[in-house]
Amino acid sequence: MKNRWFWGRLLSSIGVLAAVLVLNFILFRVMPGDAVSTIIDPNFSPEAKDRLRELYGLDKPLLEQFFLYIKQMLTFSFGLSFLSRKPVWDELLSRLPGTLFLMATSMFLSSALGIWLGIKAALNRGKLAERIVLRAGAVTASFPGFFVQLVLIMLLARTFPIFPLRGSVSIPQPVGTLSVTLDYLWHMALPVLSLTLMGFGGWALYVRNLMVKALGEDFVLMARARGLSENRVVYGHAFRTILPPILTILLMSVPGLVSGAVITESVFSLHGVGTFLLEAVSGHDYPSAGAAFYMLALITVISNLLADVVYGLVDPRVRVGGRDQ
Amino acid sequence: MRDILKRKSVIMLICIFFAGFLGPMLISGHPSDVTGAPFARPLWWNAKLPLSSEYVVGNSGVEINWEKLPPEIFALNGRITADPEKEVRIIWSTPVGEKTLDTLTGSDLYWINMDGRDMIFKQKLGLPLIGKSAEHLFPMSGRYSLRTEGAMETELSLSLSGGREGLLGTDQRGRDVLTLLIFGIRTSLIVGISATLIASLLGLGLGLATGYIGGLFDAFVMRIVDVLLSIPTLPIMMVLAGLWGKGLWQLVLILSIFSWMGTARSVRALVLTVRESPWVEGLRVLGAKRGYILRRHLVPEAAPILLANIALGVPGAILAEAGLAFLGLSDPRLISWGRMLHEAHSFGAFTEGAWWLLIPPGLGIVALCLIFMDIGRFLEEKIDPRLGSGKNA
């Protein structure tokens, strides 16, 4: 991993993060509307207004504010929320695991199901499996995820009350680690299920196309000629070669995944960063909104970097450093 | 290119266009007018539910034959003139007994304004405060009558809002869902098309400029593209919608800022290949200026790509608009399909089981997206026949 390629990726991640930081700063300081105007009553005395400005560091010159802001963002000290007057970081920290869990499980399930179906489709061309994959891939792209989720709630939480209507935990919360875990999983089932349902079609279609191409290559013919078992040929040889492009798609899907998680959390009223962002935005709570946005961007950048590392492990051309990215 | 008018999706799009822009003119009244009881079912849903009905209550009262389930709202409006000395009583007689709705004395003119949903009304009649009072006023099917006693002149109107209203029912405020749906077409089309148009023009301009000029400018713009493609756009759009306000054109602007990258990339790639081709070199040798080459030769080259990009970009913009509106980040006065889903989600569609608030706007969004995708694919095949199945090439 000690090659130029990896350091290049790290540098580019840092570049994206820097751009996000600058964007976040510009959005909240230079935009029309004073950041404190929402908590400052017009009837306040000028001294009180100044004191509030001082409290939030808005009296200093813009450049100094910028450096202060960078320092705050890098040390995760986001200040106090305008709405709850509590530290933003504490609130974010309590919501981060939920969002990460939702994203990770739905990504894992939809990619696993999609890859499995995609390979099945490529092996059974013209059969039912392939037709399902081709249809699902095209149709799910046109469905707004939240609409599917609303219909699922209507069906599986209201008409047939199998799953809870909303929330991350039951009220009152059950006692005992096991029942708390089960209760959480029960609440997360429908969100994860719906995200998987919306996500696997695209995966399957993509993997199917890659796999069809890979199975037509000469090395597959060679492997078959050597008398290797079909499983060995498909998974050991053909699938191995399409891993890097799959990882590329994984990498590119992360921003969409974050957006999907934000909407999903709102639909199911889950305790997560997305609902926090929505509450902050609709309540004009600027420190919280900025921090939540920064957090979501950070999740994206870090998972992109992780995908890059795995990419390096999977693709030997990258591992030896011969590939110019 | 003429067979585009025979394509089913194009025909459907034209129909939707007409519905969206002529429909609102044909519908009398404002979409936010209350037309019936909240959460009324669609007309064709359950024949046991009553339709809305109005009765004029004159001096002799009115007789009603009730065969269906109780109505949703029981409302009585109008005036009664009487002798101030005498007591006036409004009596509702049901198959199981009589109820005195109100007893009035001491005036020669009474204005009546009763609504079965009012707490005071329920309290006066001794009905349970939670639940529909109309269920207690209509305990079973049979003959009902409303009459006044001791009045000189009765001019009342009894309106019974039914549980069925309109082709697609009503929402939580009693607005007609079909009317809202038709008014929502316009928002989706305007936002989807204009945001994509602006984004495509932006992408065209930047793609041409970066491809042709190259150098630092190219590197700079392409880095911006990389950054914008690798950060989640929904959170940043939410923040912008929160900061900038929520009007229609703000939404269009926000959406177009975050959807020009793809077009810019493909136009740039095209320009990079065309720039080195012999005929462009020939133009340069002839002394053509850079602006002339770009305007007269490269823009027409890029136009087909642009057209397909626009058609394929509209679904993304429609979905993004619906998403923002669904999160409540759109103007509440602006009727849109996303907004309808937002209101259904926030105002008790689930407790009511009101599927008719979810399915029409949701399927509307899906239909528009599928139509534009189909048109986009059609245009792509026209540009590059190798993509197609061979049927349309």
Image: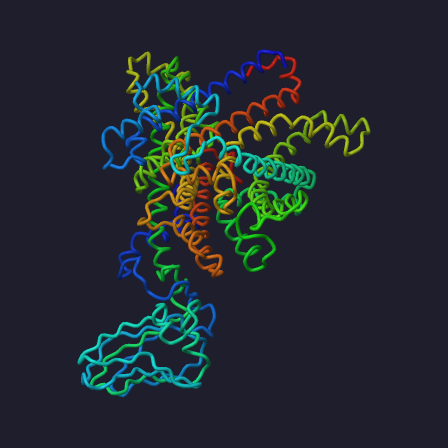
- Relative to B264, is B137 above or below? below
Give the percent coordinates (x, y) of residue B328: 39, 45
- Relative to B9, is B31 above or below? below
Q: Between residues A165 and B306, which one lies in front from this camera angle? A: A165
Q: Answer with the quarter of the image where residue A162 lies.
A: bottom right
Q: Between residues A55 and B243, which one lies in front from this camera angle? A: A55
Q: Between residues B112 and A146, which one lies in front from this camera angle? A: B112
Q: How is the image coloured?
A: rainbow
Q: Relative to residue A282, is residue A131 drawn left or right? A: right
Q: Relative to residue A307, is residue B311 drawn left or right? A: left
Q: In the rendered view of the protein, which quadrant contains the C terminus of chain A?
A: top right
Q: In the rendered view of the protein, which quadrant contains the N terminus of chain A?
A: top right
- Relative to B282, is A105 above or below? below
Please indicate, yes or no, whether residue A77 appears anywhere in the rendered image: yes
Give the percent coordinates (x, y) of residue A218: 70, 25
Outermost residue on the right side: it is: A227
Please indicate, yes or no, whether residue B305 appears anywhere in the rendered image: no
Give the percent coordinates (x, y) of residue A308: 58, 22
Residue lying at 65% horizontally and 37% vertically, measured from the top left = A112
Q: Answer with the quarter of the image where residue B356 lies.
A: bottom left
